[in-house]
Image (spheres, helix red, strand yellow):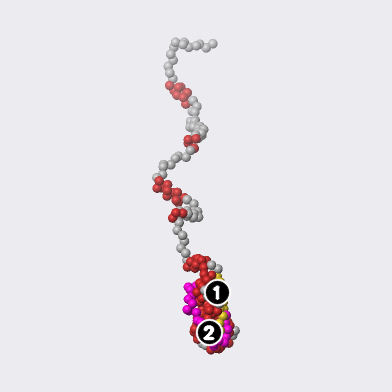
């Protein structure tokens, strides 16, 4: 059996042997740096999800944005004017004429009949041959241009002294026509020309219309070259 060394005896350190022991120790490889574990996503609070309020806009900027962003719509009708300041529409000439005619009452037909002198009848016949129409059409054409003036004079009022009393002896071509006058004008004629309702007004007014028509017919035929 081997002899044990005395425990109380201190052995001398062998430096070369200790160095060999340090070389023989395994060298640990460096460990890679560990990445920090990802943190769990934090829950968004109600306050975080709410949009951040913008600073208060100035009144002028707000009005401009309101005007720009307003949708284009059809123009609204203007409000009705106050009844206290409503003015009546201006009456035109036609409206005034219609009012006057309404005041006169319903129209009345005034028939007149007369004959033309021989010379005018012959000239009218020549005009009708050239125009290839009846002689009566020539008379009606000329009378149609004069009729508005005759009606205007009748409406204004005719005195008894304006009606010829004598009858013409030279009369060849007969002609008759009618004029529509107001009831008021017809009443004035009856009161002026036949106040006692003895003869009526057609015969006197026929003489008056003949006296107005003959000068006009003469000038009208001359303008046609006859």
Disc 2 designates what residue?
A: 167
Question: Can residue 189 be seen at all in this image of the molecule?
Answer: no
Q: Nearer the viewer, residue 25 or 213?
A: 213
Would you place residue 181 above or below residue 65 in this image? below
**Nearer mark to the viewer, of 2 and 1:** 1
Q: Residue at x 53, y 70 (%)?
A: 183
Magenta-highlighted residues: 154-176
Disc 1 designates what residue?
A: 197
Q: Are marks 2 and 1 in contact (CB under 8 Å)?
A: no
Question: Can residue 33 be seen at all in this image of the molecule?
Answer: yes
Q: CA distance from mark 2 to mark 1?
A: 21 Å
Element marked by disc 1: loop
Would you place residue 89 above or below residue 52 in this image? below
Q: What x and y, as percent, mark residue 212?
A: 50, 81
Q: Is residue 155 magenta?
A: yes
Disc with the residue nearer the chain's start (2 vs 1): 2
Q: Residue at x 58, y 84 (%)?
A: 174
Q: Is the residue marked by circle 1 packed among few (<14), some (14-19), or many (20+) residues within 10 Å?
A: few
Q: Is residue 158 magenta?
A: yes
Q: Nearer the viewer, residue 12 or 123?
A: 123
- The quadrant in which the N terminus is found is top right
Would you place residue 101 above or below residue 225 in this image? above
Residue 87 lies left or right of residue 106; in this view the side is left
């Amino acid at each position: 059996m081997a002899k044990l060394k005395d425990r109380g005896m201190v052995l001398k350190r062998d430096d070369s042997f200790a160095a060999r022991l340090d070389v023989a120790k395994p060298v640990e490889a460096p460990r890679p740096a560990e990445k920090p574990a990802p943190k769990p996503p934090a829950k968004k609070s109600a306050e975080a999800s709410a949009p951040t309020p913008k600073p208060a806009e100035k009144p002028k900027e707000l009005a401009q944005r309101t005007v720009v962003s307003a949708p284009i719509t059809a123009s609204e009708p203007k409000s009705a004017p106050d009844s206290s300041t409503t003015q009546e529409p201006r009456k035109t000439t036609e409206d005034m004429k219609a009012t006057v005619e309404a005041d006169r009452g319903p129209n009345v037909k005034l028939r007149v009949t007369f004959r033309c002198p021989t010379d005018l009848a012959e000239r009218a016949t020549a005009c009708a041959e050239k125009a290839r129409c009846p002689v009566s059409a020539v008379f009606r054409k000329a009378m149609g241009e004069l009729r508005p003036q005759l009606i205007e004079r009748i409406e204004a009022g005719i005195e008894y002294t304006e009606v010829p009393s004598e009858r013409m002896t030279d009369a060849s071509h007969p002609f008759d026509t009618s004029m529509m006058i107001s009831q008021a004008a017809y009443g004035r004629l009856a009161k002026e020309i036949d106040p006692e309702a003895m003869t009526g007004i057609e015969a006197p007014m026929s003489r008056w219309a003949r006296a107005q028509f003959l000068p006009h017919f003469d000038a009208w035929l001359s303008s046609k070259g006859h």
